[in-house]
Amino acid sequence: MSSLVVPPPQRLRTALTVLHRHMFGPGPSNVPPRILKAGSYPVIGHMHPETFEIMADIRSGIQYMFQTRNPVTLAVSGTGHSAMECAIFNAVEAGDSVLAAVNGIWGERVADMAERIGARVNTIVTPPGGFFTNAQIEQALSKHKPVLLFLAHGESSTGVLHPLDGIGQLCHKYDCLFLVDSVASIGGAPVYMDQQGIDILYTGSQKVLNAPPGTAPISFSERACRKIFNRRTKPVSFFLDLSWLSNYWGCDGKATRVYHHTGPVSAFYALRESLAILVEEGLEHSWERHRKVAEYFHTGLERMGLKLFVEDKALRLPTVTTIVAPHGYDWKEITSYIMKTHNLEISGGLGPSTGMVLRVGLMGCNSSISSVDMVLAALSDALTHCHKSKF
Ligand code: PMP
């Protein structure tokens, strides 16, 4: 007689299988075989010299991808949200003034995170699909005197690619750090961290990089480090404390590294390989490919009679496209029909764009003419077969 109160779950008696699916939502995207294979290599220790070499490769790959020479460049063990919190928790102290530019969900989330640690948070807000002029930003900087300004470069909930030029310089004029979210844009649209005066830049592994979710590249400028390493108080999170992380990643120049947490080595292998693929293709080539494929996609959508949510072509995110939810249809029926019939994920809106849009992500290896043709065919089929109201 067993002493166990909880019996073994029947379903766990069979091995796992997961079938292929076209991942054309806003993320995660498909992971190509070379990256999947890297993730399956033998696990070695998180403090072994070979792992440190892999981590050094990752750091140089991120510096290339971000176009930065910042020594404090690493990958957080966690998804994009962990990098957001790493940025906020380290750069902001209780009582500091923070300014979040909100043109979708990501500014809202950052405002929430900063409030949780006792910051004085102000926002500038546009309706979904909008952006901020440099004059609007300067006005808010001079009014609120924040220590940090947050801006999403690729607003994946609304499909806006926010202009970056000149904003870093404005921040510096007002003695403010410039924090940029590039989770949905990096590798798919130009970012020059150093030249654009970005002080903290982060992204995720599961979008253009085509690695599994779970690692989040981040980099800190010298100005950001000056503030962070001269804090009056310790960051609220031990796990995300940049002093610890920069030692583990070999960014602090110290001869010895101290155990902080068990780095997810298999995720590091996959991230390393995804960066190697980006290096192989070349950053500029990747930007150009995403731009051309997006243009081809947008033309195809308009030919079908669909409307793009972001009217100004220059502001359209090439990685995640937002389509005005087709009139007379239930958007949920469209996404479920496409999933069921075409084994293909696209999604609805998120946060402030819920109910307003359909979102299609074509990122990294998914940014191709053949993927676009597949999505256009699936959408056209859905519009023929899904229920349409007469009004
Ligand atoms: N920022 C942006 C722009 C994103 O698109 C996402 C993911 N959808 C995140 C942050 C959060 O990343 P994660 O889901 O990996 O935590």
Image: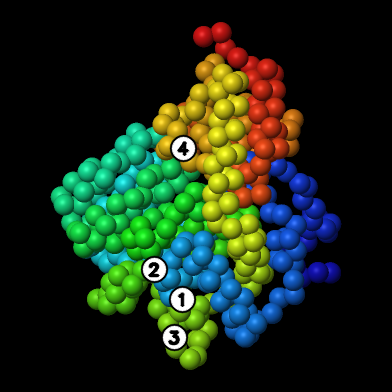
- Three-letter amino acid code at the position of disc 4: Arg
Give the residue displayed 70% in from the left and 61% down from the top.
35
Q: Which residue is label 3 attached to?
A: 253
Q: Is mark 3 within 8 Å of ligand 1?
A: no
- From the viewer's perspective, tell me whether residue 322 is left or right of residue 40: left
Distance, label 2 to label 4, CA atoms, is 27 Å
Q: Is mark 2 within 8 Å of ligand 1?
A: no
- The dot on residue 92 is none
Q: Tell me the distance, in whole angstroms, between the alpha carbons under discs 1 and 3.
A: 13 Å
**Dot 3 amino acid type:** Gly
Residue 17 higher or lower than 304, as above or below: below
**Element class at badge 1:** helix
Give residue 126's quadrant in the image. Answer: top left
Q: Is residue 26 left or right of residue 131?
A: right
Q: Which residue is mark 2?
A: 220
Dot 1 or dot 4: first in sequence order is 1
Spatial CA distance of label 2 from label 1 is 12 Å
Please tell me whether residue 22 is drawn above or below residue 244 in the rendered image.
above
Marks 2/3: CA–CA distance = 15 Å
Q: CA distance from mark 4 to mark 3?
A: 41 Å
> Does residue 15 appear left or right of residue 303 in this picture?
right
Label 1 amino acid?
A: Leu
**Which residue is the extreme one toward the left?**
143
- Residue 280 position, x and y percent, is 64, 61
Q: Inspect this view and state whether residue 310 appears.
A: yes
Spot occupied by residue 61 in the image (x, y as percentages of width and height) = 55, 67
Mark 3 element type: loop
Which mark is first along the chain, 4 or 2? 2
The reply to whether callout 2 and callout 3 are in contact (CB within 8 Å) is no
Vertical placement of residue 75 versus 131, above or below: below
Q: Give the residue at x 59% y 21%.
A: 303
Dot 1 corresponds to which residue? Answer: 245
